[in-house]
Image (cartoon, grey):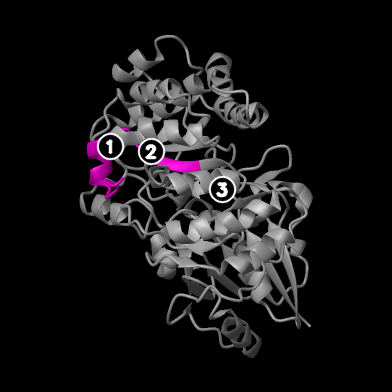
Amino acid sequence: MKSLLLVLPRSERGYWGKVHHGKAGFVRLSLPTVAALTPADWNVRILDARVEPVPYDQPVDLVGLTAFTAEAPSAYGIADEFRRRGVPVVMGGIHASARPDEALGHVDAVVLGEAEDVWETVLADAVAGRLKPTYRAGALCVMRAMKTPRLDLVKREMYTSFNTLQATRGCPFDCDYCAVTGVFGRKFRTRPVAEVIEVIRAFDTRQFYFVDDNICGHPGYAKELFRALIPLKKTWGGQSSITFARDPDLLRLYAQSGGSYAFIGFESINEEALKRVNKGWNKADDYGEAIRKIHGAGIDIVASFIVGLDGDGPDVFERLFEFIMKHRISAAQFHILAPFPGTRLYDRMAAEGRITDHDWAKYHTSEVVYEPKGMTAEQLQRGYYEIYHQTYTVKNMLKRVFRSWRGIPERLAVNIAYRNKARRMPGGGEPGGWDAIRDGGSLAPTAGAASEGKPSHSG
């Protein structure tokens, strides 16, 4: 029997995708899905290098890797060591799909895009010793009768959120900074609702998480799915565009089906900045009313914002903080704009000569790797730290946590998690911090190794 080792590498820097107290966040489904696609005559092991050491000395016939951009250096190091020992390595994922020639400097083969329709061919070629440099399916996979990800191969105790699934792929939008459509396409695809419900029924916890990039991307499908979820009496969270607040039925069904919170990419409160990255459909002027409707339905919001967009000045941090507090948004995460390879943003910034650092380990949305237009890189970096510190002081946390009596424990838990993240950042939310950013004051040391989450503009 052949042996396959699937490895998720680690991010060496930043505040996202890291592990503390021996636990990662939610289970990423890429490697469990590949494991499910692997024939039964292979012995498969999944290893998360964020929480386990890589067993280079154990015998293995083939290694498979996936990586976000910030994880690519770690992935390449793992691949180099296995190949030095004579073990062939295959790599897939967002970064390798965007940079196949680069990846081929470290691995034997790259899977471009989705693996469903090519993986068995990859394995057959590996057994025959004739791996091709690249594999790409002729079309996006049909999301019917899909294999159930092998969560049984994942060490449950290493994750805070174990049961995850995917009901849709793709995104109907096409933002300049987002790498998702490069892998999953703009065509919005859906799994049959009955198949999704079957997976959820098998979960052994009441809570689960949709890892879809936009669970409400097809409103008709989402309504059908949510109606089918209601009898299960589960509790779930997922990512959605703020546009779901414009549909009263969709919003009501989201809540009735157990949707307790929504991760929403607001990105900016600057309408002009949104238009410049092809996200003008996100109407910043309508945010307040949308938040009121979402809160009114009993749904908490985890908001994601990008700072450093063209059009952002040094005052963006204080204005953004005031917006969050005014609307008492349950929790917020912030990301420094990152020109991920494979995006139009990267191509545009590269053409303009604005990318200042190509060390992929720094592309974790916590460090500045380009030349901002409306402020200095130092102001952007310091503002990023400051807004985290200000948002997650105990006083400001409690103002948002006690927005209503319903959901207090959940809001408190997520705020504590983000506060722990903020406390690992330089600075400390001192009085006058906003003025220091506007004045271009000195910057504390930049981000080193620290923490965990999901950036909204995936790399």
Q: Is residue 327 left or right of residue 272?
A: right
Of residues 37 and 380, the one nearer the viewer is 37
**Farthest residue toward the bottom?**
128
Q: Residues within 10 Å of mark 1 (few under 14, many from 20)?
A: many
Q: How many marks?
A: 3
> Residue 265 falls in which quadrant of the image?
top left
- Compare marks 3 and 2 and give the one earlier in the sequence: 3
In the depicted structure, whether residue 232 falls above or below residue 147? above
Q: Please, is residue 334 above or below residue 29 in the view?
A: above
Distance in Å between CA atoms under marks 1 and 3: 24 Å
363 relative to 353 in the view: left or right:
right
- Disc 1 marks a residue whose amino acid type is Pro
Q: Secondary structure at mark 3?
A: loop
CB atoms of marks 3 and 2 within 8 Å: no
Which is more N-terminal, label 3 or label 1?
A: 3
Residue found 49% across the figure and 22% down from its top:
391
The residue at 68%/65% (across/down) is 198
Q: Quadrant of residue 181?
A: bottom left
Residue 149 coordinates in the image, percent (x, y): 67, 66
Disc number placed over residue 368 in the picture, else none: 2
Say which residue appears at 40% left-offset and 43% top-offset.
242
How far across and how far down the image is residue 49, in percent?
Answer: 67, 54
Asked if labels 1 and 2 touch by Cβ distance under 8 angstroms, the answer is yes
Task: Give me the disc on residue 372.
Answer: 1
Give the magenta range: 263-281
Residue type at mark 2 is Val
Residue 161 in the image: state x and y as whole percent. 68, 47
Res 28 seen here: no
Label 3 sits on what residue type? Answer: Ser
Q: Is residue 280 magenta?
A: yes
